[in-house]
Amino acid sequence: MKHKIHIIWGTEAVRNIEKPKKGYTQKTYTFSTEKELNCFLEGVDEANGWLEYFAYENKKEWQEYLKFELSDGENNEK
């Protein structure tokens, strides 16, 4: 049995200030198991309120990303 959830993303769409747009602010997600669905929803809940994210496996990746971002996108080694 597939497990499906529909999500409206964004304050304006959630509050119906703007009409939700299918495939953009209105999306449907399908999962094979209820556990996968619940894990996804836990991640959505954890991310609520943040505008962007950066996933990394070690601190060096994060530091390299920051160095790149703080240099206005130019990869200048200092």
Image (spheres, rainbow, N blue to C red):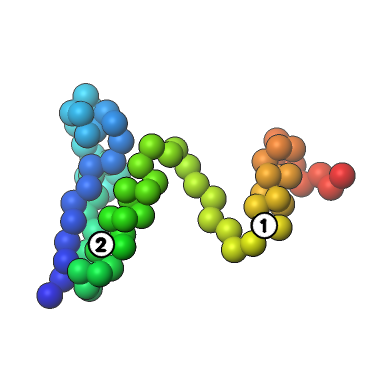
- Which residue occupies the foreground of this view, 24 or 32? 32
Residue that protrudes farthest toward the right in the picture = 78
Q: Residues within 10 Å of mark 1 (few under 14, many from 20)?
A: few
Q: Residue furthest top?
A: 17
The amino acid type found where label 1 is placed reads Lys
Q: Of 8 and 24, which appears nearest the observer? A: 8
Q: Horizontal and vertical percent for residue 47?
A: 39, 46
Q: Does 25 sit left or right of 74 as displayed?
A: left
Q: Is residue 44 above or below residue 36?
A: above
The residue drawn where x is 58% and y is 58% is 56
Q: Write down the residue under mark 1.
A: 59
- How many numbered circles does the render carry? 2
- The image shows residue 19, relative to residue 34, as above or below, that is above
Q: Earlier in the sequence, mark 1 or mark 2?
A: 2
**Badge 1 element:** helix
Which label number is shown at residue 47?
A: none
Specify the amino acid type for callout 2. Answer: Asn
What residue do we see at 70% from left, 50% from top?
63
Of 57 and 78, which appears nearest the observer?
Answer: 57
Please tell me which residue is depicted at 18% across the width and 56% down the height of the picture: 5
Q: Disc 2 on helix, strand or loop?
A: helix
Residue ID for mark 2 = 38
State the residue lying farthest toward the left. 1
Rendered-image quadrant of the N terminus? bottom left
Q: Is residue 58 above or below residue 11?
A: below
Q: Which residue sits at x=71%, y=58%?
A: 60
* Distance CA(mark 1)–CA(mark 2): 28 Å
Q: Are marks 1 and 2 in contact (CB under 8 Å)?
A: no
Q: Quadrant of residue 12?
A: top left
Residue 3 in percent (x, y) is at 16, 66
